[in-house]
Image: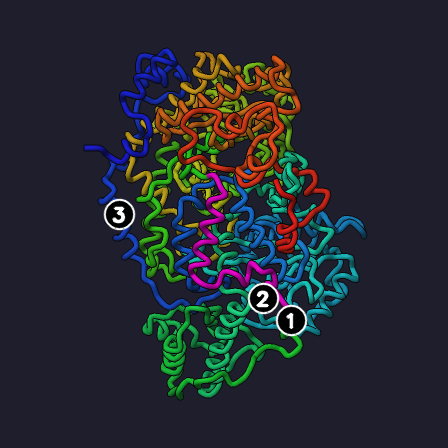
Amino acid sequence: MTGFADRHIGTGAHDQRHMLRAVGAGAVEELMADAVPEAIHESGAPAGLPVAASEQEVLERLHGLAAMNTVRTSMIGQGYYDTHTPAVIQRNVLENPAWYTAYTPYQPEISQGRLEALLNFQTMVIDLTGLGVAGASMLDEGTAAAEAMLLARRATKRGGPRSRFLVDADTFAQTKAVLRTRAAGVGIEIVETDLSAGVAPEQLDGVFGVLVQLPGASGRVPSRGALEELVAAVHERDALVVVAADLLASTLLASPGELGADVAVGTTQRFGVPMGFGGPHAGYLSVHPGLERQLPGRLVGVSRDADGAPALRLALQTREQHIRRERATSNICTAQVLLAVMASMYAVYHGPEGLRAIAEGVHAKACRLAYALREIGVSLAHEHVFDTLELVVPGRAEDVRRAALEENITVWVEDADRLRVSVDEASTDTDVADLLGAVARALGTTPGPLAPESPGSALPPDMVRTSPYLTHPVFSTYRSETAMMRYLRRLADKDYALDRGMIPLGSCTMKLNAATEMAAVTWPGFARIHPFAPAEDVAGYLRLVADLESWLGTATGYDAVTLQPNAGSQGELAGLLAIKGYLAARGEAERDVCLIPASAHGTNAASAVLAGLRVVVVGTDPSGNVDLEDLRGKVTEHGDRLACIMITYPSTHGVYEEDVREVCAAVHDAGGQVYIDGANLNALLGHARPGRFGGDVSHLNLHKTFCIPHGGGGPGVGPVAAREHLAPFLPGHPLAQTPQRADGAISSAAFGSPSILPISWAYMALMGGTGLRRATEAAVLAANYVAARLEEHYPVLYRGTSGRVAHECILDLRPLKAATGITVDDVAKRLIDYGFHAPTMSFPVAGTLMVEPTESEDLAELDRFCDAMIAIRAEADKVAAGTWPKDDNPLVHAPHTAECLTGEWTHPYTRAEAVYPVPGLVEGKYWAPVRRVDGAYGDRNLVCACPPVGNFEAAPAR
């Protein structure tokens, strides 16, 4: 019988025999023995991993875990709210592989659909926050607030250096926790202050920014006059104001921009994205014009293609902070694209009138509840609220909580005397009446009937919004389900994702995201759980988390694992902060030097900077390995200041370095720690464990090695695994349901992005230890096969001492450019005409392509890619021979659209050569929707919101 591993791994035994002959190996075991250094190679998968189960068994076990969670009516609020995901969005986005298997849109010509959806997201945020520029999503609200804090510090230049950041006491607890963690690493002092009565001049001494929650965590909505007075006082001191704004409330309340704020942050979770025990959700960050080059993360902008037609792409990419390595001011290199698409489509589906109606319905229920509570003698802390009420019940908060639980309702207990209740889109009149009854019963009184109509607004009169929003036609055109379904299909058809073909991106591991793994994500037992629900209500989640932490620890050879980081970059930061915490506890806080090889990914250096470490670059030798002589020199030079080294294994050059144990020993002997980046773990599972060959800590990428889909640029999960001595310094959370330290939060939710953890849990349960080992072997074989087939046409830049590559290989296109003038960009764009997503361009070496085929591709697809690359080489040779001019050939004009074929054709190559360069492309051909995009034009003419429809209508014919 065929097991799951046989379906996950694309090449069967017959195909692998053919591939082994091509690479000159007699068996897979021989290939792995050649490739993996003997000093770290293990003979079998480690004990402690699950035994492979069938798909039906895994689904049944997941149903059992979901059943252990209790789905209640959540009135906890505090930044997380129940919501209705429109079925047309759930089915056509969240559950659609055309959306969830796509990669980050670095190749804009094949990403126009999700770029348009992200532009809708940015426009939605811009309109609702009243600020001029918004990014393409952040990891969560807490991270967005932390990034806004850092932005405020670097944008505040006058008045000398300042290090204090004021945070309103009425801010969500999880946001304050993340701010404290992120501030400590870079020497910022968080000053928590009650801003309800304004701010005194002396409180602003040394302050570069102030954060205010709107509405507050207690539900309070201040008057506009009070907020404008606060903003004026802060601006008087040349500091910036950050408003953490609820976007649903912003449909009724004056926007942050109208109040004078410089930056707005928050979450879009309540726009149709399930709570999911805390994530993933798309955070947002918007700024006033002039601060756009300070924005962390990604920004979608409007440009034009080679024919002058409008086209979208990631704008100002040189501004992406992680690219700047040790000069970085942020380590964010990803976003929450899939969730941002859902939130944006929620706004497209409902439109401004629909969103306002939802907000008015929520507010009306809160007002009716407030009136009824006052009628039974309950004191409320605030008169002006949107959706949250703070009940003042001296000494009775716990009694009320228990009474509400008897009605299947959960609430937020602030302290013994106060509790908070929030209503949301999913709250019904019955829910509100049941909550009212529970409160009355706990307080020994009898409630009257809930008023059928709202007794009036509880918003401050001067805070009522009068400005328009979501006026672009996209937010009013697709109101019927038919129209919405077709719009989503039209966008998806513009893009290239794994459902079309291989995405051979090096260092990205674009492998199969199996349907069985994805199935549980939308089940109510996982999706409708509040992150701060009582521990007894989340037993299934806690069991799943414990299983996954144990399995990941076993697979990597580490003693402790945390799943809290919700991106690889945040995992890096958490691991480095654990090292700093450990060194400080040993009295060695002066150790602040982080060694990083020149070949490392930019996020390594960026994360080190954000952890408060000094980056020292270590050279690489001609073979691409860490230069041991240079390393030893740097270790000696920095001696007792050495904190750690960050290495990636296998290296970013795609080889297993023979001397990895020596590298680790050199740092350990000097008193430093070893951080092993887990980006390339897909080449190690079942064969070597970083925690056993010298690593002290690693971050892993569940969105690479463990099958969480990339979602077009997020979500991701970046767990941190560590040896026992670092375990006490891994991230904690003040609101976790399990025993852990209260500080060190790196994400808003204690378990990061729990609703997608069932994907990786299912993958490991389905594959088992033996299957994971087989997957590694198949991935390494595929990369060596590609290298063997293409070596004659493109030099393979690096190989190990045995002549093998790891799970990826770097093809050197610099000789091609020297001989023909054809660039790596030309080859990448020409691959689109052949029906492929390009490999990783110019990383880690400029002028190269890094190819990672993964274990999931079958031999036919591997050969199709190799055939395309060989054919492209032949086309380049025609340019070199003069058959085609250097400035007029199918490579420099790639990609070709269907529309470009319809006009006059003056090129020296035929239409067929342009779009059907190899046999077999006619059926099922992918057509790029735009020609090559002009990024420089878009950066010179920056537009980061939906342009007027007329811009597209006036596009020149192609």
Mark 2–mark 3 Cα distance, whole angstroms, equals 42 Å
Q: Is residue 622 magenta?
A: no
Asked if the residue at tag 1 contacts the one at tag 3, i.e. Cβ–Cβ closer than 8 Å, the answer is no
Between residue 522 and residue 244, name the one nearer to us.
Answer: 522
Residue beneath label 2, please?
Answer: 170
Residue beneath label 1, please?
Answer: 196
N-terminal of the two: label 1 or label 2?
2
Residue beneath label 3, please?
Answer: 59
Q: Is residue 493 above or below residue 487?
A: above
Q: Is residue 878 above or below residue 758?
A: above
**Quadrant of the rendered structure where residue 502 is?**
top left
Q: Tell me the SS state at disc 1.
A: loop
What amino acid is labelled 1 in the image?
A: Ser
What amino acid is labelled 3 in the image?
A: Leu
Residue 290 at x, y percent in the picture: 74, 51
Q: Tell me the SS state at disc 2.
A: loop
| Residue located at (72% from left, 54% from top) | 289
